Image (spheres, rainbow, N blue to C red):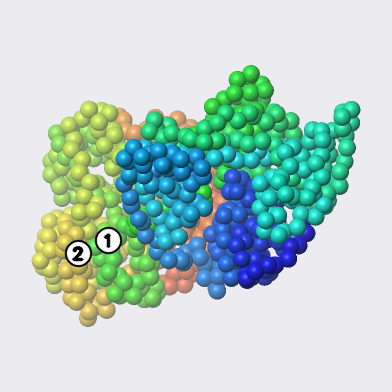
Amino acid sequence: MTDGSISGSGGRIVVDGRPIEFAAGDSVAIAIMRSGKVPGGGGTLCLAGDCGNCLATVDGVAHVRTCEVEARPGTAVAGDPGHGKPPLPIVDGRDLTRTPIGRELGVRRIDVDIAVIGGGPSGLAAAAAAAAGGGNVLVLDADSGTEVVAIYPGRSIVAREPAGMLHVRADEIVVATGSAEIQPVCPGNDLAGIVTSGAAERLQAAGVGLGVAVAIGSPPSGVACTVLDGRLIRFEGDATGRLRSVVTTNTDGSEMTTACDTAIVGLGRAPRDVLARMTGDDAISLVGSVADEHPLPAAPTAGEICRCMGTTVDDLASAWDAGYTELELLKRASWAGLGPCQGGACLPHVRAFIAARTGTVPEPFTARPASRQITLAEAAADTTIDAFRRTPLHDEHLALGARMDRFGGWWRPWHYGDVVGEYWAVREGVSIGDVSTLGKLVVSGPDVVEALERIYPCHVADIKVGRSRYALLLNERGHVMDDGMILRTGESRFVLSFTSGGAANAEMWIRDWVDTWGLRVHVMDRTMSLAAINVTGPHAKELLARLGLAEPPRFLGHLEADIAGVPCHVMRLSFTGEAAFELHHPVDGSVTLWRALLDAGRDFGIRPHGLQALFGLRLEKGHVIVGMDTELDTTPHRLGMDWAVRMEKPAFIGKAALERTSRLPDTRRWVGFAMDGEAPPEGSPILGRDGDEIIGNVTGSWTSPLLGRALLLGWLKRTPFPDRVVINGREAVVTATPFYDREGLRARA
C-alpha cells in the first residue's frame, strides 16, 4: 500500500509516539493505512469490525478495533502486543492501572416491544413491519452511533452510545446484522497488505492508494486491480512482514507467482451472527443475510486459522488428533474462536475443518457477551460497587491520616504516617487497632461440642466457660486452611474467630460439615454485625480500667462488659506479643468506643497502629498469618505447630492424612532467620550457603526497631536444613522463634 493524499479538513493523531495526519471522516485504521502502515501488525483487514486484525490500544484502552474509532486530533494509538497482555499504561507519571481515568458513564434504560439490531435494508424493513402492527419499535444501528455489544438472557440488550451506555429490555429482538466477508486461511495469511473486497472499496473511497493490487475471487467495485484466476495457494512476504506476492494455480495446475503490494480477497460471505449466538431465546429472530445459509469455504489445510489467538491449522489438527472432535471442545483445546472476534473471522473455517472430517456441518458455538472489548467503566456504568468492604471505623482512619490499603477483602489502614512510632506505642505504651475484619461465628446447639471436636484438631470439650483456645482449621488432606480462636460462652454455645480473608470460607466449611453429619448445631455469622478493636500494650489494662473494666480477664479468658458505655465481649489474646484485649461490640457503637479509647489514653501517648506495624510485631513473635505465610499444602508439622494437633483424639478432619504423611520424608519447614542490616523484601529467594541454589523463600520481613536487626520468616525446601543461608546477597542465620519474649511473659502480664 502507498501513502494517500490528505483531502479536506483533518488533523493529526499520534501512533506509537509519532504524529500522523488524517483526513476528515477517517477511522483510526484508515488514517494509519494512509500513512503507509497497517494497524494490528498483519493479517487480513476487513475494516468492518468483523475481525481482530486492526486491534490497538487507543487513548489507554486496550484491544480497540481501530476501524470503528473515528480519528480525532490528539488520539493516542499504541500497537497491541501481539498475543500477549496489553502494556500497563503510564501517562504523566501516573500508573493508570491504579488511577481511574475518563468520565463517569451513565446508563439510559428503555423498555420496548421490539428491538431491531441493524439499520440496513433488512432491519429497517423489519422495523417498519413491526411498527405497522402497532408495536413500540426501537432500531439500534452502529452506523448511527448506537453499537450493540451484548444480548443477555431475558432479552436484555447492552449498547454503547456517544453519551454513555444504553440498556434495553425488549419483548422481541430482531437481529439484522448482515454478513461478513470470509478471510483467507493459507500460508502467509498473517502478512500485512491483505484486505477484503469491502475494505479495498473503503480505502478507495477514502483516497488511500493500494499500490500494485491483485484480486483473488470476486473483485471489488471501482478499484484498480488485476484479477487472478486459479486457486489461492499462499501469500509471500519480506523480512518485515509485508506482502510481496501471491501464489495461485494456473489452469494446468502449476503455480503462478504474482508480485503485488496489496492482495484483495473476495472469498464469499458468512453470517455476522456473534450477537445472535449469545442466547438461544425463542423471542430472538434473524432477518436478512444474517439468517441466510452461506456456503462454507473449502476446508483449510495450512496457515493461521485464528489470527486473534495465533491458532494455526496444525494446532487445530493436533487438538483433533488428541480427541477433541466436538466444536465446543475443539475451540477450547486449540483456542480458535476464543479471541476478541469470537469466531467472526475463523468460525467458517473451523466448521469447514470439522465438516471435511465428519461429513456433517456442526452448529456454530455459543458466543459470550460482550461482542466488543468494553472497558470496566462501560461494563459497570451507573453501578457503584466497592469489592472491598469497609469497617465502621473507615472514616476515623482517614481522619487520622491513615494510608488505606486492601487486605483480606477489606480496606484497612496500612499505617498512619509513622510506622516505627506505632510500633513503639504497642511495645512501650498503649495502642489500638481496628480488627473488625476478623471472622466471627456463633455456634450453638445440643451437638455443638461433638461438631467442634470433629472439625478441629485440638480438644474442645475441656475448654471451660469463659476460657478460649487457639486452633488450626484443617482440610481433609491435613493442610492448614485457617486459624483463629475457640471461645466458650456457655455449655452449648461457642464463639469462633477466623482470619479476615478466610472467614467466608470457614463459615461455609463449618456449615457444610454440620449439615453432612446431620448434627443439631446452629451457625450464625456475626462478622458484619460486630466490630472489634484491639487494645494492646503495657498500659492496656490501665486504659480499660479508666473506661469501666475494673477486673479484666486473665490471659486466654473472656467476659462481657461495658467499655465507655458500649457493650463488649472482651477477649484476652495477643497477636502483638504484649498484653492485648479484643473488644468485640455492635457496629453502631464502634466510633464511640474508638474515640473514647483515644481520649482516655492521651497521657499514655496512645496512637492507633496499622497493618505494617502489626505485621512487624507479630513477626517478632513468630506468629503465622494463614494465606501469607502458608501454602496450599502447608501442614501443622511444616509450620512447627504440632502442639496445636492432638493426634490422640479419636477423629478430626485431616487426621487420617496426617497419620499417613507423618511416615513420609518431609523437605519443607517454615523457620525464622536473623541478619544484619535492613530487611530484604518479602518474597525474596533464599539461597543455600554457597549461593548457587534456591532452597526457599521469604514470607515475612521486618527490620526490628527493638532488636536492631532484620528478622524474617520463610520456607526452607531442601534437606538437610542448613543453619545459614544467603538472602539478597547477605548471610542470614536460621533462628528459633519467637525472636521476642520467648517465655511470653509480656502477653500474660
Give the residue at x 54% y 59%: 61
Place of residue 363 in the rendered image (x, y in percent of width and height, measured from the top left)? 54, 27
Q: Is residue 503 visible?
A: yes
Task: Work out whether residue 517 or residue 145 is closer to the camera in this orientation and state it.
Answer: 145
User: According to the image, label 1 marks what residue?
Assistant: 391
Name the residue at the top extreme: 359
Q: Residue drawn 82% across and 35% down? A: 229
Residue 735 x %, y %: 49, 58
Local crowd at mark 1 within 10 Å, few (<14), some, or many (≥20)?
many
Residue 434 vs 49, above or below: the answer is: below
Which one is in front, 268 or 583?
A: 268
Q: Position of residue 298 (x, y in %)?
A: 70, 29
- Name the quadrant of the C terminus: bottom left
Place of residue 157 in the rendered image (x, y in percent of width and height, measured from the top left) = 40, 45
Question: Quadrant of residue 540 in the image?
Answer: bottom left
Residue identifier under label 2: 590
